[in-house]
Image (cartoon, rainbow, N blue to C red):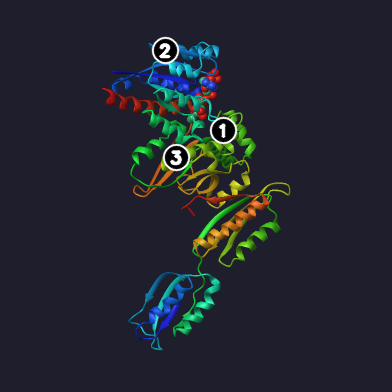
Amino acid sequence: MKDIKISIIGFGDVGQGVVQVLSQKQQTLEKLGVNIKVVAIVDSRSSLVNADGIDLEKAVQVKRDTGIVGKAGSTTAEIIKNTDHDLVVEVTPTDINTGEPGLTNILTAIENGKHVVTSNKGPFARNYAKLMKAAKDHGVILRYEATVGGAMPIINLIQENLAGNTIERIDGILNGTCNYILTRMGEETLDYQHALLEAQELGIAEADPTYDVMGIDAACKLVILANTAYNNNAIFDDVSITGITKITPQALELADKNGYAVRLICEVSEQVLSVAPKLVPKKHPLAVGGTLNIATIHTDLSKMVTISGIGAGSIETASVILSDIIHISTGYLTHTL
Amino acid sequence: MNLELKDIPGQLVLALQPISEIKGNILSVVHHHDERTPRGTIPVHVLFELNKEKLDELIEQLEKNGVLVARVGEKRLHEEMSVMLIGHIVHTDIRDTIDAVDSTGCAEIVDLALSMPGIEQVSSAFMIIHASTKENLMSALDILHKTADEKGLLMIEPIKNAI
Ligand SMILES: NC(=O)c1ccc[n+]([C@@H]2O[C@H](COP(=O)([O-])OP(=O)(O)OC[C@H]3O[C@@H](n4cnc5c(N)ncnc54)[C@H](OP(=O)(O)O)[C@@H]3O)[C@@H](O)[C@H]2O)c1
C-alpha cells in the first residue's frame, strides 16, 4: 500500500464532493493498492494542513458551520510549495478571461513537481499548450477529464480508447443548462426567460447565466476537446460562438413540426470550431433532452462513437476527478515501486 | 438524359466528353449494347448533374458530335437542406431572400413555413432548400447567411450529415 498525498484547492461543491467520494470509496481504493491521504485543503479565505491526513468529515462540517475550512494566513502558493504532497486537485471557480486563480495554482503545482487533477476549464481557455508543456518539462501529469462533459469520460476516450484513430469531427452537447432550457421551451412552449427562471430555481442555471446561455462555457470545453484531439493550440478566441438567447418557443414548435429539435451544438474539427444552435433530427442520437451531455466522435477507423452522461453535479464531477487521481496514483505506483 | 448513338465505334466518348467538359458530374451510364431503336441507333441513358443554364450548350455540342438527344429528363435536384431563420422577419424581406436564392438558378427554396405570432414579436421561418450540387447548396447558404447577418436574424442550420 502506498500513500498518495493530495491537496484540494477550492472547497465548494466539487471540492467537497471529492472529499465525499474519497471517504465513500476507501475500500475500492484499498483494493487498488492506494491510500489517498488529503494533507491540505484551501478555500478563498483559509487553509487547513495536516501532514498525517486531514479528518475529512470534520473538515466538511467546519466548512458548513463556519464558512471557512481552516485558518487564514497562508497563500495557496505557499501551501502548494511547502506542504509535502504528490498531487494537487485544483477546483477553484472558472474564469475564462484570465484563467485565474486556477492558472497560477496549476503552474505552481507543476513547477513544484506535483501532479495535477482539475475540473476548472478557465486555465485551458487560452493556455492549454503552455500548461501541457510545463507538465511535460517538469515530468508530472496534468489530467482534466472533469473540465468537459461532467461525468462523461470523453477526454480519456479520445486520448486512450480511440488512440490511433484520426478524429474527423466531434459534435456534442456540452452545456446541460442550455439543453435543459431548450428542452423545456420546446416541451411546454415556455419562452426563454421563463425556462431560464425555472432552471435557476432548480439550481440548473446559475444566478448569472451568461457563461452558459451565451455559449461561452461550451466554447471553452470545445477548446479543450480541440486541443485534446488535434494538439492544435486552439484558444477560446478561435471559436465562433452563437448562444441560445434569441430562440423562441414558436421557432422550436416550427422545427418540431418539421421533424427537428434545436440544440446548442459544439462542432470541433481541424477546420471548424463552432458553438451554435443547430437543427437536430428528432431521431438523431444528439437530440437528447434535459441536462444530459452527449458527444459523437467521428473517426476514420472506429467510425462513429457516441458517449453521453450527466454533465454536472458535485458527486458526478468528483467521480471523474477520482478516476483521474486513481489513474495517476496507480501509474505512479508501478513507476516508483 | 436519353441519347441515341450511331452503331460505330467511338460514339460513347463523343456522348460523354461534352458532359464532363462543361463540368457536368456523371452519376451513371447505362449503355444498351444489344438493343436497337427503330432508327438503328443504340440507346444510352446518362444520369448527370449540371448547372441548368448549361443544358442548352450541352445539347448543342452533343448534336454537333452526331449524338441524338432523345429525351431530357426533368431536372433533378440532389441536395436538400432545412434551415431556420429567427428574428424580425417581414413578408417582403423573406420574399427578397427567397428570390436571392432562387435567382442563382442552381438552388431553390422549395418549402417555406412561417410562424408570425404578432406584429411586434419575433417570427421564425423554416425553409427547405434544394440544389443540384453541394457547392450550389453552399452558395445558397452563403446568400442566406449574408441576409441573416444584414437583418440581424439568427440562422439555424442542421448538424452535419443529418440533412
Ligand atoms: N459544480 C459542477 O457541477 C462542476 C462541473 C464541472 C466542472 N466544474 C468546475 O469545477 C470548479 C469548482 O466548481 P464548484 O461548483 O465547486 O465551485 P464553487 O462551489 O463555487 O467552489 C469554489 C471553491 O473555490 C474556492 N476559491 C475561490 N477562490 C479561491 C482562491 N483564490 N483560492 C483558493 N480557493 C478559492 C471557494 O472558496 P470559498 O468557499 O471560500 O468561497 C470555493 O470553496 C469550477 O471551475 C467549475 O467550473 C464544476
Q: Estimate the spatial distance between the alpha carbons at disc 2 and disc 1, rounded to whole Å.
A: 34 Å
The disc placed on residue A54 is 2
Q: Who is closer to the viewer here, A293 or B64?
A: B64
Answer whether residue A166 is visible to the viewer in this image.
yes
The answer for which chain carries disc 1 is A
- What is the quadrant of residue A140 in the picture? top left
Q: Mark 2 touching mark 1, by CB under 8 A?
A: no
The residue furthest right is: B119
Pointers 3 and 2 within a single chain: yes
Choose mark 2 or mark 1, whichever is in front.
Answer: 1
Above or below for B143 versus A329 = below
Kind of residue sitting beneath label 3 = Asn
Disc 2 crowd, CA 10 A, few/some/many (<14, 14-19, 20+): some
The residue furthest bottom is: B39
* Ligand 1 closer than 8 Å to label 2 CB: no
Q: Dividing the image into 4 quarters, which one contains the N terminus of chain A?
A: top left
Kind of residue sitting beneath label 1 = Asn
Q: Estimate the spatial distance between the alpha carbons at disc 3 and disc 2, rounded to whole Å.
A: 36 Å
The answer for which chain carries disc 2 is A
Q: Who is closer to the viewer here, A88 or A34?
A: A88
Residue marked by disc 3: A227
In the rendered image, residue A233, in percent from the top left (x then y), is placed at 46, 40
Residue for point 39% across, 78% down:
B13
